[in-house]
Image: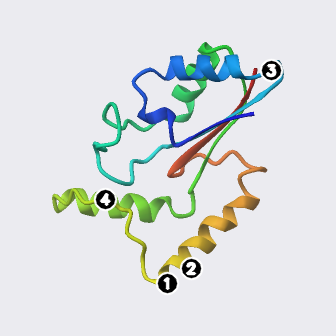
Amino acid sequence: MVLLLDVLEHLDDEGAALETARRALAAGGTLVINCASLRLALERSRSCARPSAPLHGSAARRVVERAGFAVARVTYFGTLLFPAFALVRWLKRGRGVAAHDLRRPPAAINALLASCFAAERHLVPRLRLPVGSSLLLIAHR
């Protein structure tokens, strides 16, 4: 198994990374990709080689299939909190705030957010969620 967790959307050449992952896997091996579909931090992250462009389901599927993988599943997660994430991002953009979203909220709010996020663990394996803050793609060599 190869895991690409919050990596692919930061690379200049996703194809090269996927080819490396493919070579690392035995036949039938599994590739798991998690990537941001909504940029929650800075529009341009200083740690990225390029502006951090969200990678959406159909684009991710095409890139992974071009690298020779058979895509088994594409879904989003962070769906229950997506409206709140999008609203905060929109409000910050409207006020010209370029600060990141990496600050931990107060304990009570953090517990509520964690509960909402954890509730999705029952949905993600069963449903194809149409929108969310992150994308999950599972493919096989």
Q: At x 75% / y 23%, what residue is drawn?
A: 25
Q: Which mark is residue 26?
A: 3
Q: Which residue is mark 4?
A: 100
Mark 2, residues whose alpha carbon is within 10 Å: few (<14), some, or many (≥20)? few
83 or 10, which lies in front? 10
Furthest toward the front, the residue is 24
Furthest toward the left, the residue is 96
Looking at the rendering, which quadrant does residue 27 occupy? top right
127 or 26, which lies in front? 26
Q: At x 49% / y 84%, what residue is drawn?
A: 107
* Residue 79 x, y percent position in the rendering: 57, 57
Q: Which residue is mark 2?
A: 111
Marks 3/4: CA–CA distance: 39 Å
* Residue 50 x, y percent position in the rendering: 32, 31
Marks 4/2: CA–CA distance: 20 Å
Q: Relative to 87, is 16 above or below?
A: above
Q: How many marks?
A: 4
Q: Which residue is mark 1?
A: 107
